[in-house]
């Protein structure tokens, strides 16, 4: 689900960060989703099982707010209107609320896959004796 990102590369270089900040502000302002009252995580497609599980793990208030934002944006879209500027999502309100949960689920799935693919070998009598000899036991 997660995609490669240039963000860590840019954040390590202050000169590049200063150059990219106005460009990113311009992009987010013109993306249009904030003018409908949405957040960036509201745009994540819900078709994958990982996202479905993440949505189930959302706190009830956050889940309710997400549904409200989605319905309000849908109504605005049907009416071909934008929200009044006072109701637009501000940059400080546009934080990631779903992405950390998705990353946590992906880490759990990866760990589960690693544990399930682990091969356990029983020690035989011959390997036990050779192990004892190496350890200095006779």
Image (spheres, grey):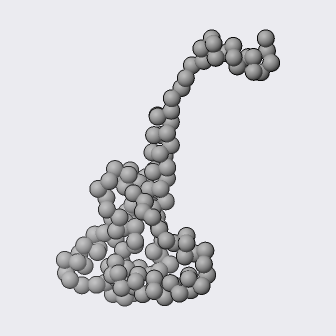
On the image, the x and y values in percent for residue 123 come to 60, 18
| Picture quarter with the N terminus | bottom left
Q: Nearer the viewer, residue 30 or 93?
A: 30
Q: Residue at (57%, 19%) from the top-left corner?
A: 122
Q: Describe residue 10's horizontal placement relative to residue 99 as left or right.
A: right
Residue 129 lies, with reference to residue 101, above or below; the image says above
Residue 113 lies, with reference to residue 23, above or below; the image says above
Q: Nearer the viewer, residue 9 or 46?
A: 9
Residue 8 lies, with reference to residue 83, above or below; the image says above
Q: Residue at (69%, 17%) from the top-left corner?
A: 130
Q: Describe residue 23's horizontal placement relative to residue 127 as left or right.
A: left
Q: Residue at (59%, 14%) from the top-left corner?
A: 124
On the image, the x and y values in percent for residue 92 come to 50, 78
| Picture quarter with the C terminus | top right
Inspect this view and state whether residue 66 appears. yes
Badge count = 0
- The quarter of the displayed image where residue 90 is located: bottom left
Inspect this view and state whether residue 98 appears. no
Q: Nearer the viewer, residue 113 or 103?
A: 113
Q: Residue at (25%, 73%) from the top-left corner?
A: 74
On the image, the x and y values in percent for residue 17 come to 56, 82
On the image, the x and y values in percent for residue 65 come to 39, 66
């Amino acid at each position: 689900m997660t995609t490669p990102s240039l963000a860590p590369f840019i954040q390590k270089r202050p000169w590049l960060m200063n150059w990219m900040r106005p460009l990113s502000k311009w992009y987010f302002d013109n993306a249009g989703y904030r003018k409908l009252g949405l957040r960036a995580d509201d745009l994540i497609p819900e078709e994958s099982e990982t996202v479905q599980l993440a949505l189930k793990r959302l706190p009830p208030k956050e889940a309710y707010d997400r549904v409200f934002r989605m319905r309000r944006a849908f109504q605005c879209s049907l009416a071909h209107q934008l929200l009044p500027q006072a109701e637009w999502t501000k940059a400080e309100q546009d934080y990631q609320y779903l992405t950390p949960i998705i990353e946590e689920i992906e880490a759990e799935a990866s760990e589960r896959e690693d544990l399930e693919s682990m091969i356990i070998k029983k020690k035989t009598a011959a390997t036990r004796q050779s192990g004892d000899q190496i350890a200095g036991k006779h």
